[in-house]
Amino acid sequence: RLRVGDYRIIFDVIKNQVEQARTLGAYIATGGQEIRGMIGYWYRPTVILYATEEMDVVRKETFGPVLPIIPFDEDEEAIRIARYHPWG
């Protein structure tokens, strides 16, 4: 039987990134928690408002249903934020 990766590690990374964002002042608009009662590791689709560039959920790839939203005032600021990341 083929077993690809340890999903618990990925699951814990998602949980930690969302919790770090919350601790640093982001607002979890929806989701932000695991889904219990199912076999495996399931995380609710999560929308994070007021994310900032220093948060891991913004700086690193999150392999889960998580969407950080970074506010900006000017178009130039949005471009700077997008260019900050290696994947744009």
Image (spheres, rainbow, N blue to C red):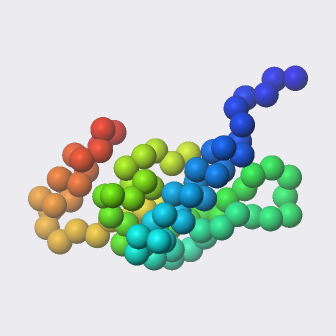
Residue in view at x 56 percent, y 58 percent: 16
Looking at the rendering, which quadrant does residue 43 occupy? bottom right
Q: Residue 18, image x and y in percent?
A: 53, 63
Q: Is residue 74 above or below residue 66?
A: below
Quadrant for the N terminus in the image: top right
Residue in view at x 58 percent, y 54 percent: 14
Residue in view at x 70 percent, y 63 percent: 34
The mark total stands at 0
23 horizontally vs 4: left or right: left
29 horizontally vs 7: left or right: left
Q: Residue 10, image x and y in percent?
A: 63, 45
Looking at the rendering, which quadrant does residue 26 occupy? bottom left
77 horizontally vs 48: left or right: left
On the question of residue 29 being in view, the answer is yes
Residue in view at x 12 percent, y 59 percent: 76
Q: Residue 84, image x and y in percent?
A: 24, 47
28 horizontally vs 71: left or right: right
Looking at the rendering, which quadrant does residue 77 occupy? bottom left
Q: Is residue 73 above or below residue 4?
A: below
Q: Residue 61, image x and y in percent?
A: 46, 44
On the question of residue 66 being in view, the answer is no
Quadrant for the C terminus in the image: top left
